[in-house]
């Protein structure tokens, strides 16, 4: 019994010695690795779960409850944050029971344990064949781009049962990521908890370059809602990384403003801003021959999750339908992306000309991009990039958007872009295009040409990553 317990005792002593060199967020030396983690964990959990919303003034009340994407997801997002944090702590504890890995030539893309609402528990390169969310696509396509450039890449994602290799990329369970291993570069994909645990322990991953890749607006909402204590901890987490990678300038500005609000007492943030770099996502091209041969000029495509404004679009349907029917056209709305995670819980009463298509694999998505004319997108979410809108713009489905967050960039390639929250103006812009198909076709050609000139493909994105975020800091 004593011999069997010896490795565990040595591991615990090693963990205690490592954590003993750190300090807690209270500035006192910890007496055990548990102390250095428990106090900040309780602080973060309390601010996320127990903080009450500030009362809104009457003028600030939203006309539609749950109009923004993450309002309805706040509790789920908070719980998923804490579950991910607990798994990261467990990963550090378990790491002392095994020999550290040495993979000095591997680029590790760490995607967490799959607790993010809407994310599938396990996904890999095969997910593209079935249809996948935008963030998952980005991780898969970046990995493929780096492999094509001769790099060895492992994507650690979700609670997969085993490791597999698809098109040269290794996809492994997140639990197999070795926090004490050695890697050529590590990319932390939109889950800062592993950085947060490192910050609490006063250590960093053994790698030449450590990047934090921020994909979407979820943490903007959480940073605003959870309070100054939570923001202070996330500031510590971000400082662990060598580079913070954003897909748009708008997201970089918004994230910095949320992380360092004037209402908080903090230590500036110039060091965090100096680490920030913008590396736009690549946009896949499903076909090059963009024409109107198969296009139905009265069909609308909805290729994103419904919480991003589908209810608002449904309120516009009478006017949009009338614009098409008045000229004898065929009106239809094709709703995609309504499968998996929180999407299964969505209940909507829909008219007959609104069709659910589910999560579309590439061939079916390409067919919809050939067939539909507009993507009317009344989203109140400050999008970080919006892969779906750029896919539409590149393939002839004109996005009609609010100039909010990164969506404002679509105005620079000719897409109708109105003031944020002005639903009447958004509806009017869509009606104008639906009522005049010849003018819409001319605008479509202009949008496609300008969007394809502005967008980056994933091969170019991989080159940019190699030249910036994957290089050892000087």
Image: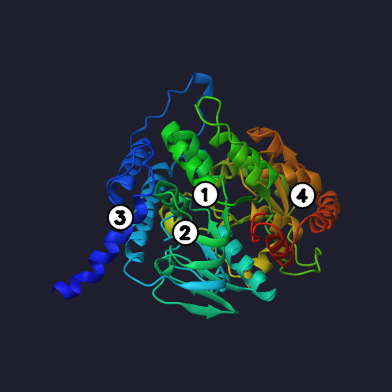
- Label whose residue precedes the other's in the sequence (3 or 2): 3
C-alpha separation, residue under disc 3 versus residue under disc 2: 35 Å
Colour basis: rainbow
Q: Are marks 3 and 1 in contact (CB under 8 Å)?
A: no
Q: Is residue 377 left or right of residue 290?
A: left
Q: Which residue is mark 3?
A: 16
Q: Nearer the viewer, residue 204 or 467?
A: 204
Q: Which residue is mark 2?
A: 119
- Label whose residue precedes the other's in the sequence (2 or 4): 2
Whether residue 319 is visible here, answered yes or no, is: no
Which residue lies at the image location 51% right of the left edge and 44% below the top edge? Answer: 219
Q: Nearer the viewer, residue 191 or 345?
A: 191
- Label 4 Cα crowd, 10 Å radius (few <14 / some 14-19 / many 20+): few
- Residue 461 at what x, y percent from top left? 71, 62
- Label whose residue precedes the other's in the sequence (2 or 1): 2
- Residue 103 at what x, y percent from top left? 52, 73
- Indicate whether 83 appears above or below 320: below
Q: Nearer the viewer, residue 400 or 225?
A: 225
Position of the C terminus, as image quadrant, is bottom right
Q: Which residue is mark 1?
A: 240
């Amino acid at each position: 019994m004593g011999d069997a317990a010896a490795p565990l005792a040595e591991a615990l002593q090693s963990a205690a010695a490592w954590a003993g060199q750190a300090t807690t967020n209270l500035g006192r030396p910890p007496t055990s690795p548990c102390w250095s983690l428990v106090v900040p964990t309780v602080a973060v959990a309390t601010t996320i779960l127990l903080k009450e919303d500030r009362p809104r003034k009457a003028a600030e009340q939203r006309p539609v409850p749950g109009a923004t994407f993450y309002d309805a997801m706040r509790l789920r997002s908070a719980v998923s944050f804490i579950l991910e944090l607990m798994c990261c702590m467990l990963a550090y504890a378990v790491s002392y029971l095994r020999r550290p890995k040495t993979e000095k030539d591997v680029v590790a893309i760490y995607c967490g344990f799959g607790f993010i609402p809407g994310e599938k528990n396990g996904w890999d390169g095969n997910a593209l064949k079935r249809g996948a969310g935008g963030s998952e696509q980005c991780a898969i396509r970046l990995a493929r781009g780096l492999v094509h450039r001769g790099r060895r890449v492992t994507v650690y994602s979700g609670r997969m049962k085993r490791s597999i290799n698809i098109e040269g990329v290794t996809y492994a369970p997140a639990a197999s990521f070795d926090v004490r291993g050695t890697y050529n570069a590590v990319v932390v994909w939109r889950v800062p908890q592993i950085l947060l645990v490192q910050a609490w322990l006063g250590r960093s991953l053994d790698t030449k370059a450590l990047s934090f890749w921020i994909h979407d607006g979820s943490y903007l909402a959480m940073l605003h809602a959870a309070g100054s204590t939570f923001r202070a901890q996330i500031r510590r987490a971000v400082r662990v990384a060598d580079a913070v990678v954003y897909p748009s300038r708008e997201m970089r500005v918004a994230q910095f403003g949320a992380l360092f609000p004037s209402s908080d007492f903090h230590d500036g943030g110039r060091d965090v801003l100096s680490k920030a770099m913008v590396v736009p996502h690549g946009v896949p091209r499903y076909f090059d021959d963009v024409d109107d041969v198969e296009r139905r000029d009265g069909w609308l495509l909805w290729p994103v999750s419904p919480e991003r404004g589908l209810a608002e679009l449904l309120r516009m349907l009478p006017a949009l339908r009338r614009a098409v029917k008045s000229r004898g056209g065929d009106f239809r709305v094709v709703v995609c992306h309504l499968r998996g995670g929180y999407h299964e819980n969505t209940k909507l009463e829909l008219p007959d000309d609104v069709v659910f298509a589910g999560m579309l694999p590439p061939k079916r998505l390409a067919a919809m991009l050939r067939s539909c004319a507009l993507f009317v997108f009344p989203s109140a979410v400050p999008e970080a990039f919006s892969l779906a809108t750029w896919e539409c713009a590149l393939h002839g489905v004109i996005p009609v958007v609010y100039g909010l967050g990164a969506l404002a960039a679509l105005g620079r390639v000719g897409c109708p872009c109105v003031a944020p929250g002005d639903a009447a103006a958004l509806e009017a812009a869509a009606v104008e295009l639906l009522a005049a198909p010849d003018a819409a076709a001319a605008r479509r050609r202009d949008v496609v040409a300008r969007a394809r000139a502005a967008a980056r493909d994933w091969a170019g994105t991989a080159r940019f990553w190699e030249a910036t975020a994957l290089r050892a800091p000087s």
